[in-house]
Structures are given as structure tokens and as C-alpha cells.
């Protein structure tokens, strides 16, 4: 497909990384459910193991179906490559474990998905990796938290639960000034809404379980390398710039100037931690990626209608969506997220914790569950589920009120979603009477 | 490994093995705004199959100290000086794009030192359009994007370079940005293109080359189309191997390019 410009996003979503199968002519990407791949000869085997040739050896390390997904996501993100992982959490762990070890330090946004917070605050501490959390809007805080042993800055493109918009150009400049990369979780935005690499981020990961897959069927993750960070500019990353005894004494930054991180992550992290993706999962996520542009457009269209409805309803105290002028990151969102601010947001119901429960139980189309990014609309009431152990004061500290409701807007008819919400709001109102 | 060439530090990748000047040597020379990593797979293979390898970063590119050299002739002299620094008497000279002209010129200047000449993705004259010359000067990032797009013939390169899961076009763009930024020389791409555009000595050099020559060309190359290599191929009486790829054959079709290189080095 030669031309004077790269194909557009929608074309890449369908074609990047894939050609009709040369063995069978199959047009769709085949599912290569095989653990391993036959060597042509002993010499061929040795050269694959020694990175003298490119190819597949064992599906924990790489697989042709997974490779299509990896190349496609890298193409959509404007990166150099990707690694498909067992989950979004596995992708985050792979990124950190490739760059940090005991004695390392991370500076992270305090507005993170709970699972990411758990990993950083509790689990990694046990392995000697400490994290300082800063509020994502506290630019001086990011700068002040960096230590000599800091190896990574980390935030979400849209923070949890208030949709804080990460100022990627500014935070990445702070990271680069300190000689470290910026890692971002782009799950809520997907490359259709924003390509973090173009704004200065160095590494991007997704819970592909959400919008990339889009159908609430599989768990998966992906870690994308932007390829623009110069790992050799400091002595911060000996994992990439010094010989690695665990892989032929390889110096990854000598093997690839733009792909050193991915080489190490695959040759060490996937090999040793083993959190790889099943080819069947990769195939299902590819089905989702192929319609990502269409789905995201509809997610945003529906979300805007629902946000407008809720913002004008008497039972709603506030809606936390950055496209609203009332959101503290409204101006930044207009700059970084002109196509929309995703379809996951929270609003505050006027009333008690009990009224929140009534609201949830009155919904008929919205499914009450702990996930986001499905094609179906989803809802959760943090005060009675994920944060039920907290009293009201603790909820307030976490930015949650007894009436906070989180919605993930799906692809149904917007009028039906609004009718469903209208009915549930009325039920909640009655419960408070 | 690091060498001192003409009083300045130079870097050459040795293919993952300690350099041994007693072995047959293969020198790999990259193209405009590239570095040694465009040769990783081929260089590693050679280093583990009986060759000593020097995949260089040309002066002013990535790890070799600047300033960048402004002509193909100066780069050829530098390659010969690098052989001296590495205590190598003879070597197979393998170059890609601009580097292919450097290899040719070096083989012409010192025919007794070249055991083989391999020109990958080459053309003569290697004219660069005035529009691209201007773009590389005024907006090098746009030039990187344009040239990268033109350099690959598909949006699915298998099996991936240097391994599976790599978006090769993205790698091309990122590498250009890294090389451009490394030594804070925003004119590096322009200087390399000017060197390609200005080089006139290919036919004279070909007349002096005594080593067997091979051209490895990309069938779908838009930057240096195979027909643009016909004159220099005839002048060298070169064997011509054609690979189903665009301009950066080593990344787009690494196995086929390796097969052609192996045949050329025999």
C-alpha cells in the first residue's frame, strides 16, 4: 500500500499488521492456536533464539495472531511496536518491571484505577519499588516528587473517578527534564480520542478488555512503545544500556535505538513473568479494534446526549465530564481531547446512599456491574459496592459522595438510555420523600 | 565498540560478539538519518557465522561524534580510516541507500581493501527532489514522516523487524527523530540528502572496483526504484538480486535480504 501519506486511522484499524494469509488466502486474521513453531533447520532455530532472524518460537514470547494485534495497536497509537498481555494490569506491571527494580521510585497520579493504585501502593512496595502519588493537576507536585532514583512518571489520560485530564505535554516535559519516561494508561480514551505519544508520552498501555475489545467478552492488555525516548542519554536504565546476562549478554539499546524497551520487555518480561495473551483473545480484540472508530464515535455521541440530560435534571447535583465548562479541566480537554472525553463519567445524585441504591436497582437497560467500555451501558454505585466499607468522610477524601454514580455509556439508542435514567431518577426521588 | 577515527570517537556495532580483526570482516554502512540498528539482524547473523562485523554509526549520527560529513567522498574516506583504526586490511563493504554510495566510493578509492561490494536499496544518480531537500531543511520531522511512508511498501511487514509485534513504519519515524535529536543538529537530514544529491563519482568509482559486486534491490522501492540502479549495476557488472520489498529491505523483508546477502558474501 505505497503512497505519499500513511493510511488514515480507520484504514489502519482494519488493515495494519495483516495481509491475507499466504498459506490459505484467508482474508480475516487467522487464529494461530499453537504453542510453538517448527524450525526449518538447526541453524534456523539457533538464529531465531539468538535474534539473528525475526520469527516466532513459542507463543508465550510471540505469536502471529498476537503480532497482528500488536502491530495494529502500535500503528493506531503512532508507536513503534506493542506487546499484548494477559490483562491491562499485566501491561502496567510489564512496563514497570522492565524499567524499575528494588530501590526504584515512581511518581504517579493519585487519580488512578483502583487496581493500579493497589499495585503501586501495596504490592510493588513489597518488592522495593516505592511510589509517590501527586494530584494530576499539581504540576509543581510532579516536579517536586522526582528523586534521583525515580525511573518513571505515570498517569491516566482521564483520571479516576473525576476524569482529571492529564496534562501530557507538561508532565512529559517534566519527565524528560529528569531523564525518565512518561507512562500513561489510555484505556478510557483509546487512540481514537487521543494519541498520547503525539503529546509527549513515551509508553502507553491499555486494558484492552474495555473499548479496544468493546464487547465485554475478554480480558486483555497491551503495552505500546512510542520509540522516541533516548534510553542511552543517562545511566538510569542499565536494563537497556548494559549487557543482560539473561539473554546472550545483549545490550538492547545497541540492538535497536527505537525498540530497545520492547526487546527487553518481551525477552525478559514476557519470557519470565509469562503474562501473555491467548491468540484467541488477541483475535477477539482484533474484531473489536476493526470497528473501534465507529463505536467510539457512537459512544461519544450517546455520552454527550446523556450528559446534557443529566446536567439539566433536578435530582442531579453535578456531572463530572470535561466537556462541561464546570469541569476544572475543561480548557485542557478542549486542547487534548477535541473528539470527546470518553464515555465513562460520574455524576452526583442528590440524596442519600439509600437513594443511590434505589436508583441503580430501578435501571433496566444499564447493567449493574464492575466494568466499563462495553458496547452495553453499565452502571455502578461506588458507595454501595467498590467503596462500601468507607464512611462518608472517607468517601469525600476519595472524591466520592454517597450519591456518586458512575456510568459507562454504550451503543444503545440514546433516547432509550435517557428514558431508563429518567425512570430511575424518579424512583430515587420517591425513595427520599 | 568504540574506536577513534580521525581523532574523534566512532561507534560500530559488532553483532553481539567481540570484534576479531583476524576474521573476514563485513562493514555495514547505513543511509541518511539512520544508524547501525537498521542492520541488526543481518549484522548479528554475520557475526555468528564466521565474520567480524563493523556496523558503523557515520559521524554525527547517533553514537559517533560529529560533525557530520558533507559528502559521500568524505564518508568513504572515513570508512577507510575506520578500517585502519580497527586494524582491518580488507572487508566486504555493505551499504544501504546513501551508505551504498559510500561503500561504492570506498571500494573505488581502495579497491585492494574491498573483498565484496554490496549495494542495498541503491540508485545512481541518487537525486533528491528540490522539494524534499527544502523540506528536510525547514521541516525535518515532516521529511522524516514523508520518507518513511515512501520507504515501506505495505502496512504489514512480516515477520517484523527486529522481531514480531513491531510496527515497522513507526520504527522508521522514531529512529529518524532519535538520530536527529541525538546530536542537536537539525540540519543532519538535509546534509545527508545534499550528499546523496551531489554525488557524481559513481561511474568512475565503479570502473576502479575490483571486488565482486551485488545490488540488492526492492521490487517496490519508491525511493530508489530498481530501474534507477541499472546504470550503476551495468558499470559494476554486478549481480542483481531483487527482493519483494520497498526501500528499507532489511526491515521489510529480513529473511530474503539475508539470503541475498549470504549469496553476495560467498
Image (cartoon, rainbow, N blue to C red):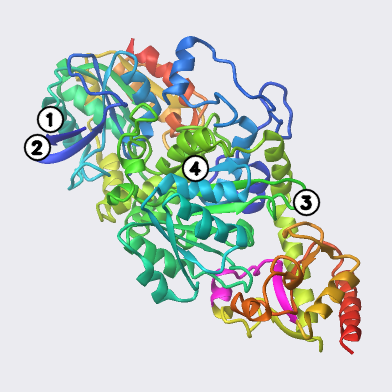
Q: Please, is residue A341 above or below residue A77 in the view?
A: below
State the image coordinates of residue A411 (x, y, percent, origin top left). 81, 61
Work out whether mark 4 precedes mark 1 in sequence or the reverse, and give the earlier one. Answer: 1
Q: Residue B81 shows which numbered tag?
A: 1
How packed mark 4 is, by other alpha carbons closer than 10 Å (few <14, some 14-19, many 20 or more), is: many
Q: Which residue is drawn at 56% across and 37% down?
A: B154
How packed mark 1 is, by other alpha carbons closer than 10 Å (few <14, some 14-19, many 20 or more), is: some
Whether the residues at callouts 4 and 1 have beta carbons within 8 Å, the answer is no
Q: Mark 2 points at which residue?
A: B6
Whether the residues at callouts 3 and 4 have beta carbons within 8 Å, the answer is no
Q: Which residue is drawn at 25% across and 31% down?
A: B102
Q: Name the residue under label 3.
A: A215
Q: Please, is residue A43 above or below residue B3 in the view?
A: above
Mark 2 lies on a secondary structure that is loop
Q: Please, is residue B10 above or below residue A371 in the view?
A: above
Work out whether mark 1 precedes mark 2 in sequence or the reverse, and give the earlier one. Answer: 2
Work out whether mark 2 precedes mark 4 in sequence or the reverse, and give the earlier one. Answer: 2
Q: Give the range drawn in magenta.
A: A332-348
- Alpha carbon separation for disc pair 2 and 4: 35 Å
- Alpha carbon separation for disc pair 2 and 3: 62 Å
A169 in magenta: no
In the rendered structure, the answer to whether residue B172 lies left or right of residue B178 reads right
- Alpha carbon separation for disc pair 4 and 1: 33 Å
Residue at mark 3 shares a chain with residue at mark 4: no
Q: Mark 4 points at which residue?
A: B169
Chain of the residue under label 4: B
Pair 3/4: label in front: 3
Amino acid at each position: 500500500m505505497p503512497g505519499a501519506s500513511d493510511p488514515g486511522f480507520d484504514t489502519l484499524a482494519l488493515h495494519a499488521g495483516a495481509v491475507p494469509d499466504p498459506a490459505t488466502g484467508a482474508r480475516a486474521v487467522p487464529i494461530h492456536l499453537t504453542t510453538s513453531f517448527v524450525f526449518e533447520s538447526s541453524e534456523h532455530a539457533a538464529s531465531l533464539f539468538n535474534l539473528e532472524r525475526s520469527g516466532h518460537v513459542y507463543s508465550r514470547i510471540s505469536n502471529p495472531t498476537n503480532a497482528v494485534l500488536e502491530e495494529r495497536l502500535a500503528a493506531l497509537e503512532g508507536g513503534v511496536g506493542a506487546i499484548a498481555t494477559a490483562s491491562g494490569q499485566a501491561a502496567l506491571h510489564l512496563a514497570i518491571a522492565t524499567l524499575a527494580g528494588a530501590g526504584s521510585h515512581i511518581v504517579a497520579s493519585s487519580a488512578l484505577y483502583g487496581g493500579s493504585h493497589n499495585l503501586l501502593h501495596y504490592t510493588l512496595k513489597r518488592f522495593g519499588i516505592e511510589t509517590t502519588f501527586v494530584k494530576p493537576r499539581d504540576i509543581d507536585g510532579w516536579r517536586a516528587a522526582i528523586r534521583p532514583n525515580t525511573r518513571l512518571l505515570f498517569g491516566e489520560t482521564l483520571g479516576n473517578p473525576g476524569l482529571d485530564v492529564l496534562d501530557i505535554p507538561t508532565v512529559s516535559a517534566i519527565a524528560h527534564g529528569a531523564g525518565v519516561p512518561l507512562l500513561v494508561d489510555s484505556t478510557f480514551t483509546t487512540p481514537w480520542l487521543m494519541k498520547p505519544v503525539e503529546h509527549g508520552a513515551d509508553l502507553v498501555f491499555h486494558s484492552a478488555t474495555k473499548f479496544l475489545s468493546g464487547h465485554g467478552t475478554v480480558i486483555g492488555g497491551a503495552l505500546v512503545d512510542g520509540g522516541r525516548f533516548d534510553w542511552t542519554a543517562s545511566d538510569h536504565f542499565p536494563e537497556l544500556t548494559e549487557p543482560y546476562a539473561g539473554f546472550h549478554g545483549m545490550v538492547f539499546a545497541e540492538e535497536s535505538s527505537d525498540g530497545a524497551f520492547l526487546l527487553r520487555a518481551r525477552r525478559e518480561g514476557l519470557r519470565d513473568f509469562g503474562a501473555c495473551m491467548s491468540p484467541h483473545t488477541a483475535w477477539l480484540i482484533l474484531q473489536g479494534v476493526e470497528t473501534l472508530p465507529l463505536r467510539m464515535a457512537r459512544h461519544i455521541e450517546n455520552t454527550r446526549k446523556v450528559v446534557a440530560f443529566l446536567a439539566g435534571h433536578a435530582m442531579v447535583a453535578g456531572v463530572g465530564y470535561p466537556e462541561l465548562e464546570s469541569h476544572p479541566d475543561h480548557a485542557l480537554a478542549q486542547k487534548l481531547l477535541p473528539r470527546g472525553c470518553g464515555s465513562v463519567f460520574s455524576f452526583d445524585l442528590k440524596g442519600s446512599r439509600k437513594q443511590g441504591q434505589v436508583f441503580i436497582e430501578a435501571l433496566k437497560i444499564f447493567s449493574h456491574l464492575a466494568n466499563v467500555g462495553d458496547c452495553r451501558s453499565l452502571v455502578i454505585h461506588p458507595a454501595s459496592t467498590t467503596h462500601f466499607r468507607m464512611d462518608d468522610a472517607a468517601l469525600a477524601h476519595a472524591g466520592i459522595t454517597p450519591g456518586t454514580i458512575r456510568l459507562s455509556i454504550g451503543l444503545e439508542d440514546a433516547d432509550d438510555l435517557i428514558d431508563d435514567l429518567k425512570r430511575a431518577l424518579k424512583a430515587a426521588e420517591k425513595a427520599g420523600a | 565498540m568504540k574506536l577513534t577515527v580521525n581523532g574523534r570517537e566512532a561507534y560500530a556495532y559488532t553483532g553481539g560478539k567481540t570484534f576479531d580483526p583476524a576474521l573476514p570482516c563485513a562493514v555495514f554502512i547505513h543511509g541518511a538519518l539512520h544508524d547501525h540498528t537498521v542492520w541488526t539482524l543481518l549484522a548479528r547473523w554475520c557475526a555468528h557465522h564466521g565474520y567480524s562485523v563493523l556496523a558503523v554509526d557515520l559521524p554525527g549520527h547517533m553514537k559517533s561524534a560529529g560533525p557530520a560529513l558533507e559528502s559521500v567522498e568524505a564518508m568513504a574516506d572515513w570508512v577507510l580510516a575506520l578500517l585502519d583504526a580497527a586494524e582491518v586490511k580488507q572487508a566486504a563493504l555493505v551499504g544501504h541507500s546513501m551508505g551504498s554510495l559510500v561503500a561504492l566510493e570506498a571500494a573505488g578509492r581502495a579497491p585492494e581493501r574491498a573483498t565484496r561490494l554490496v549495494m542495498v536499496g541503491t540508485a545512481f544518480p541518487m537525486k533528491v527532489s528540490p522539494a524534499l531537500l527544502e523540506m528536510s531543511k525547514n521541516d525535518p520531522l515532516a521529511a522524516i514522516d514523508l520518507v518513511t511512508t515512501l520507504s515501506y511498501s505495505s502496512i504489514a511487514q512480516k515477520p517484523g523487524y527486529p522481531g514480531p509485534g513491531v510496527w515497522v513504519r513507526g520504527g522508521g519515524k522514531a529512529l529518524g527523530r532519535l538520530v536527529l535529536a541525538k546530536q542537536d543538529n537539525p540540519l543532519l537530514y538535509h546534509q545527508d540528502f545534499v550528499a546523496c544529491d551531489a554525488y557524481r563519482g559513481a561511474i568512475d568509482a565503479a570502473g576502479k572496483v575490483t571486488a565482486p559486486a551485488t545490488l540488492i534491490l526492492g521490487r517496490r522501492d519508491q525511493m530508489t526504484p530498481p530501474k534507477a540502479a541499472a546504470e550503476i549495476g551495468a558499470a559494476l557488472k554486478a549481480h542483481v538480486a531483487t527482493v519483494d520489498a520497498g526501500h528499507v529491505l532489511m526491515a521489510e523483508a529480513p529473511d530474503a535480504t539475508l539470503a541475498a546477502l549470504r549469496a553476495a558474501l560467498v
